[in-house]
Image (cartoon, rainbow, N blue to C red):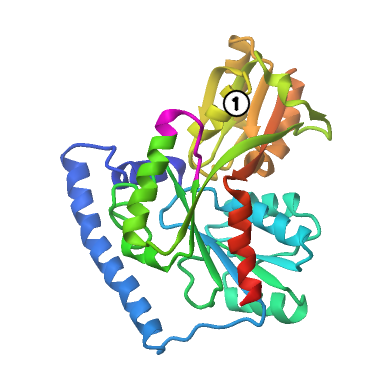
């Protein structure tokens, strides 16, 4: 599906597009959403009756998932969890579905493999098959199930759900009328909520407190933690050179990214002192073309910009075009982030408790 079509459908799902045609399409989407709801609830009912059975691994299984479409910080959290568990002596294996075609696979999976050297990352739509491989062949102590909240076929010891505080539930409607993958009542299954993209300003803190209160009504037993993104590394895509984060302080920058919420990336760059002169934001998982980059280069030259800044997640889709950028005397840099979880000791204590049960 082209970016334009994806953008159009997303604008309908998020109520951003108005007019008679949009209203008629949304009415049709509402009917599909009802059918989708019936299908989801029927599947869950069959699992409760045990007419459909879930597979139980010998090792521990931790799921990291969400309840909406779009990026909510699952992958950075998986990296954080894998690093902690591996550092504490556990044999960790990450399972990724790799859904949505090659672009999604190259984004999340390549990032996981790059950030977790030495930790196996198994990719496949059949999670039972990859779970058995992790459990029986790789002798895992713990499996991290990336994007597993809606995967009922595999039993979990811990369900972690990430929620973006800026848009936790979309418009509150199920796909395709909205961006919810399940009704909000499904959050009762969660053991831990991690609120992502929480800043230090008053508005962000107020949003987090309001969301905590709402989650307390839905699921009073789940623990709730907040998290933020901390810039960790700045590197040149064209070569092995790593730079100090201060390199972009007060420097004219062209932001280039294709992620779920580019505003979060922009806020991070601004916090580092970057003078953002140009923004080129594409749909999530966009496959960059030579024409895309040539257009950005021309705009950079017109505005006297000699640095493009992208996200670490975008690098697999930009590496093949880096020579085109450097040939025009422009540096193509990538910014890596780490997820910082507040009340870390309590969070990891809850995480580690599954090994004592």
The structure residue drawn at horizontal position 60% and vertical position 26%, both measured from the top left corner, is 269
**Depth order, front residue of 301/50:** 50
Residue 314: name its quadrant: top right
Which x, y percent locates residue 313? 63, 43
Vertical placement of 143 versus 69: above or below? Answer: below
Q: To which quarter of the image does residue 326 belong?
A: top right
Q: In the image, residue 26 lies at what x, y percent? A: 22, 50
For residue 153, above or below residue 243: below
Looking at the rendering, the stretch of residues picked out in magenta corresponds to 196-204
Taking the magenta stretch, the answer to whether it contains residue 200 is: yes
Report the front residue among 79 and 188.
Answer: 188
Is residue 122 left or right of 346 when viewed as pictured? Answer: right
The C terminus: image quadrant: bottom right
Name the residue rendered at 50%, 83% in the picture: 54
In the rendered structure, does residue 169 fall within the stretch colored magenta?
no
Q: Nearer the viewer, residue 308 or 42?
A: 42
Q: Which residue is mark 1?
A: 269
Tell me if 91 is positioned left or right of 132 in this view. right
- 132 is higher (above) or lower (below) than 94: below
Q: Position of residue 298 (x, y in %)?
A: 60, 17
Instruction: Tally the marks.
Output: 1
Residue 179: x %, y % from top left: 35, 52
Compared with 325, 73 (above or below) is below
Q: Is residue 133 visible?
A: yes
Residue lying farthest right? 240
Disc 1 on helix, strand or loop?
helix
Residue at the image position 59 percent from the left and 55 percent from the top: 346
Q: Residue at x 68, y 20 (%)?
A: 248
Q: Is residue 124 visible?
A: no
Badge 1: how crowded within 10 Å, few (<14), some, or many (20+)? many
């Amino acid at each position: 599906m082209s970016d334009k079509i994806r953008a159009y459908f997303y604008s309908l799902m998020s109520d951003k597009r108005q007019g008679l045609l949009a209203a008629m399409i949304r009415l049709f989407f509402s009917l599909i959403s009802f059918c989708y709801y019936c299908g989801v609830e029927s599947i869950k009912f069959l699992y409760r009756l045990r007419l459909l059975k879930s597979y139980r691994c010998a090792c521990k299984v931790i799921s990291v998932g969400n309840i909406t479409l779009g990026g909510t910080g699952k992958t950075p959290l998986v990296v954080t969890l894998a690093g902690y568990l591996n550092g504490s002596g556990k044999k960790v294996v990450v399972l990724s579905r790799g859904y949505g075609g090659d672009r999604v696979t190259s984004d999340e999976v390549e990032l996981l493999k790059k950030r977790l050297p030495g930790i196996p990352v198994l990719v496949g739509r059949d999670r039972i098959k990859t779970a058995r491989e992790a459990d029986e062949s790789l002798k895992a102590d713990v499996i991290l199930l990336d994007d597993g909240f809606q995967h009922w076929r595999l039993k979990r010891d811990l369900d972690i759900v990430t929620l973006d505080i800026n848009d936790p539930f979309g418009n509150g409607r199920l796909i395709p009328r909205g961006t919810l993958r399940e009704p909000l009542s499904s959050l009762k299954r969660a053991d831990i909520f991690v609120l992502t993209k929480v800043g230090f300003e008053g508005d962000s803190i107020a949003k987090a407190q309001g969301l905590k209160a709402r989650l307390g009504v839905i699921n009073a037993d789940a623990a709730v933690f907040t998290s933020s993104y901390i810039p960790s590394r700045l590197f040149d895509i064209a070569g092995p050179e790593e730079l100090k984060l201060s390199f972009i302080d007060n420097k004219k920058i062209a932001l280039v990214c294709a992620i779920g919420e580019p505003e979060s990336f922009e806020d991070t760059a601004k916090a580092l002192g970057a003078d953002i002169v140009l923004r080129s934001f594409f749909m999530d998982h966009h496959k960059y073309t030579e024409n895309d980059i040539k257009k950005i280069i021309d705009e950079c030259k017109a505005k006297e910009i000699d640095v493009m800044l992208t996200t670490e997640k975008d690098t697999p889709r930009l590496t093949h075009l880096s020579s085109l950028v450097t040939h025009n005397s422009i540096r193509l840099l990538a910014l890596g982030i780490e997820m910082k979880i507040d009340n870390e000791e309590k969070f990891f204590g809850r995480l580690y408790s599954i090994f004592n049960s």
